[in-house]
Image (spheres, rainbow, N blue to C red):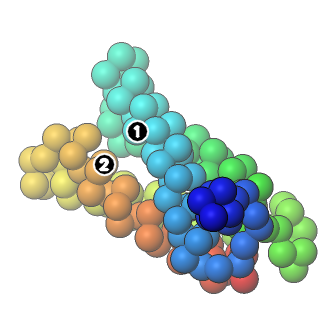
Amino acid sequence: MMKNWIHILFVAPTSNWMLQLFRYGFVGGLAFVVDYGTLFCLTQFAGVPYLWSAAIAFILGLVTNYLISISWVFSHTGRMHIWQEFAVFAAIGVIGLALNEGIMYVGTDMLQLHYMVSKLISTGIVFFWNFFARKVLVFT
């Protein structure tokens, strides 16, 4: 019984949106580690301004998210060529990037939060935007 649930949660292809959201949480977690780690390293160790670091980090997280999402969370629908699919996926990510930058700016420069706290708030909001937009516009 437990082995069957593990297979369903982590292995079997699915179109169930709740299961996809569960998996997307794992993918988002990994993409977050790439994003957050890059932001921290570029800002703290390389001296890159935090908004530039955030943009670079976000792009690296986006690519990580796409590659794992198409192989594990969603499936390539065949509606679009894979490059078109990536373009729409990335366009959603660009909107997410704009949200990320805006939230980080407001949190850090206006509310005087530490940039890493602003990033945590931004991540939570952008996660749901990305999942539902990608589910509806790319992988339906």
**Residue matched to label 1:** 36
Query: In the image, what residue occupies the spot 51% across and 37% down?
Result: 34
* Farthest top residue in view: 45
Look at the numbered disc 1 and give the secondary structure of its residue: helix
Residue 45, position as x, y percentages in the image? 36, 16
Whether 112 is drawn above or below 37: the answer is below
Crowd class of label 1 (few under 14; some 14 to 19; many from 20; radius 10 Å): many
Query: In the image, what residue occupies the spot 84% across and 75% down?
Result: 77
Which residue type carries mark 1?
A: Tyr
Which residue type carries mark 2?
A: Lys
Q: Which of 69 and 130 is in front in this view?
A: 69
Residues at discs 1 and 2 in contact (Cβ within 8 Å): yes
**Residue matched to label 2:** 119
Residue 107, position as x, y percentages in the image? 19, 54
Q: Nearer the viewer, residue 46 or 37?
A: 37
- Position of residue 67 in the picture relative to residue 119 (left or right): right
